[in-house]
Image (cartoon, helix red, strand yellow):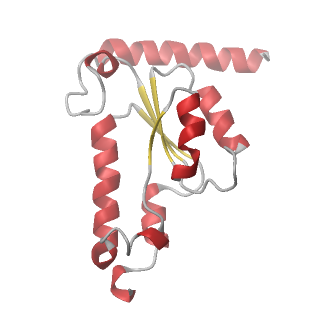
Amino acid sequence: MSFKRSLRKIGLRVALGSIRKLETNTKHSAALLSEHRRQGTVALVWALDEAGDHLSSALKDQLEKLAEFETIVVVCPPRYFSALRSRGLFFETLPMSSDLPRCGASANCDLYLERRIARIRESWSPDFEFTIGTSPEGYVQSLPSGDQT
């Protein structure tokens, strides 16, 4: 491990330790976290553009950097769930634009996705959010409008 990487890891540990001390029990609305995990740090990673059969190197690198967090949640396409589960990570997904008509949200897909994104954030109460590729808001804007379906 390089000196720069070691220094960054030490800095992250100190920062996370400070957050733990200052924000003890502030995640009351984090319905998906156990009581123990609510006292730790949570990272939410938005990886909505992941493509291919395996996790991208950018996502793997980000997950390695976030190893000091007690809880890591990745929002990505469902095909990556088993890879994330094998790493002991939590995961969420947003429906793809092609799935929206089948899930009944096509008439109001923007509103549905905005509420889903808000629910993910509220349910996990992340201390930090990281985005690889498109942001959640950019993802909603990139989908065809519900009025066109």
15 lies left or right of 63: left
Residue lying at 34% horizontally and 76% vertically, measured from the top left? 106
Front residue of 106 and 6: 106
Say which residue appears at 25% left-offset and 27% top-offset.
Answer: 27
- Based on the displayed image, in which of its 4 quarters is residue 2 positioned? top right
Quarter holding the N terminus is top right
State the residue at coordinates (62%, 35%): 62
Q: Which residue is outermost to the left? A: 28
- Image height of 31 relative to 145, above or below: above
Residue 132 place in picture, x, y as percent: 59, 48
Q: Kindly indicate the quadrant of the structure image that contains residue 20.
A: top left
Q: Residue at x 64, y 27 (%)?
A: 64
Q: Is residue 136 above or below residue 24?
A: below
Image coords of residue 99 (percent x, y): 44, 69
Quadrant where the C terminus is found in the figure = bottom left
Q: Quadrant of the rendered structure where residue 107 is?
A: bottom left
Q: Position of residue 79 (x, y in %)?
A: 57, 50
Q: Nearer the viewer, residue 132 or 49?
A: 49
Farthest bottom residue? 148
Q: Going by the image, does 139 lie left or right of 114?
A: right
